[in-house]
Amino acid sequence: MNFAEAETLAERAVAVQAMAQDVPSPCSSVCRMDRLSGFCEGCLRTIPEIAGWSKMEDETRRHVWRAIELRAKAGIWRAPADTGDRHA
């Protein structure tokens, strides 16, 4: 995911949260978990959010979308910069 994709996902998240019903899945068919962040590289969900999606009520789905929005805006999906310090 890059900045533009994250911004687009955050904008979509805002729109979806306003939906009254039939909250769509955020899945983008990337389906690859980032080992550092623990988020899917395509939709920024966690494994429990992905696994539980089909059983969630729309209100809970909107909460997941809100979490996705915050993750996308905060940039926490990015791997930390390599400082070159190998002495840790």
Image (cartoon, rainbow, N blue to C red):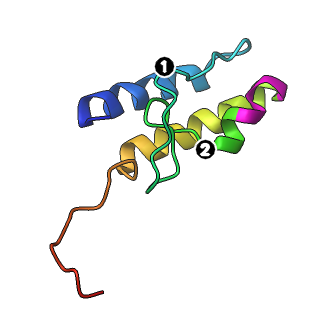
Q: Residues within 10 Å of mark 2 (few under 14, many from 20)?
A: some
Which residue is found at the position 25% from the left and 36% from the top?
3
In the rendered structure, find residue 8 and report the number of the disc placed on it.
Answer: none
Residue 32 vertical placement versus 83 (above, below): above
Main SS, magenta residues: helix
Q: Residue furthest left?
A: 84
Residue where numbered disc 2 is placed: 46
Quadrant holding the C terminus? bottom left
**Residue 20 sits in quarter:** top right
Which residue is found at the position 60% from the left and 44% from the top?
46
Quadrant holding the N terminus? top left
Residue where numbered disc 1 is placed: 28
Q: Amino acid at mark 2?
A: Thr
Horizontal side, residue 56 vs residue 74: left or right: right
Helix, strand, or loop for circle 1?
A: loop
Helix, strand, or loop for circle 2?
A: loop
Could you tell me residue 12's position as x and y percent?
Answer: 46, 22
Q: Residues within 10 Å of mark 1 (few under 14, many from 20)?
A: few
Residue 53 covered by magenta stretch? yes
Which residue is found at the position 20% from the left and 65% from the top?
82
Could you tell me residue 52's position as x and y percent?
Answer: 77, 34
Residue 17 vertical placement versus 44 (above, below): above
Which residue is found at the position 37% from the left and 44% from the top?
73
- Range of residues picked out in magenta: 51-55
Q: Amino acid at mark 1?
A: Ser
Q: Residue furthest bottom?
A: 87
Could you tell me residue 31's position as x and y percent?
Answer: 52, 28
Residue 65 covered by magenta stretch? no
Which one is earlier in the sequence, the residue at label 2 or at label 1? 1
